[in-house]
Image (cartoon, grey):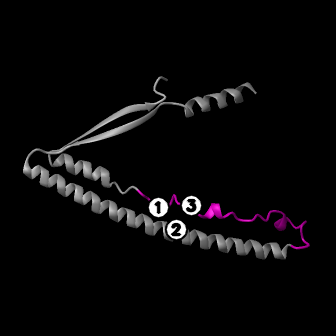
Amino acid sequence: MKPFFILVLSSLLIACGPVYETKTTYVIPTDAQGKNCASKCEKDRATCQQSCDNKYDVCMRETRLIKQNRYLEEKNQYLEKKNLCKGKEKDKDCQHLREPYVSTYVSESDCRQDCGCQTNFERCFEICGGQVLKETRCVSDCDQ
């Protein structure tokens, strides 16, 4: 019992740990050529993000449809087997018959929402002569 209590207590302490936030500041290049270059980086980032968002939306629709269809197929197979098992409850195959859950099939983890647009923008911005300054600070439960 004691090891279980220690495990639960340590899990709670970890969950209440400090929370950090990173603030990013962009220092724009001072010369006209650098400013134009940085402006192009931002336009490229916006285009990249729009394309990424569109691909994500399409992926989500297709994934939901595919997985929903897979669930419906499994559900129909289950109902057919269940129908065949009426009166055969002692049959081994009928005893292990399990109804599918829609949550098992409908997952959104198959689609990527981050296409690296921000990372590419920051590299481009620095190449243009700008600076990317990142500051990480503790914002909650900092005294631990």
Q: Which residues are magenta?
A: 86-113
User: Toward the viewer: 52 or 74?
Assistant: 52
- Seen in the picture, residue 81 relative to 103 is either above or below; the reply is below
The residue carrying pointer 1 sits among few (fewer than 14), some (14 to 19) or many (20 or more) residues within 10 Å by Cα, namely some
The vertical placement of 23 against 70, above or below, is: above
Q: Quadrant of residue 54?
A: bottom left
Q: Report if the CB atoms under discs 3 and 1 are less than 8 Å apart.
A: no
Give the residue at mark 1: 111
Query: Which numbered tag is attached to residue 63?
Result: 2
Identify the residue position indicated by label 3 in the image.
Answer: 107
Q: CA distance from mark 1 to mark 2?
A: 8 Å
Residue 7 at x, y percent in the picture:
65, 30
Image x and y of residue 42, in percent: 23, 55
In the image, is 47 to the left or to the right of 92? Answer: left
Left of 86 or right of it: where is 66?
left
Front position in the image: 119 or 95: 119
Q: Amino acid at mark 3?
A: Ser
What is the CA distance from the residue labelled 3 to the residue labelled 2? 8 Å
The answer to whether residue 12 is above or below residue 25 is above
The amino acid at mark 1 is Cys
Tell me the chief SS of the magenta region: loop
Q: Real-space Cα distance between discs 3 and 1?
A: 9 Å
Image coordinates of residue 8 in percent, x first then y, are: 66, 31
Q: Amino acid at mark 2?
A: Thr
Q: Residues within 10 Å of mark 2 (few under 14, many from 20)?
A: some
Q: Decide: marks 1, 2 in contact (CB < 8 A)?
A: yes
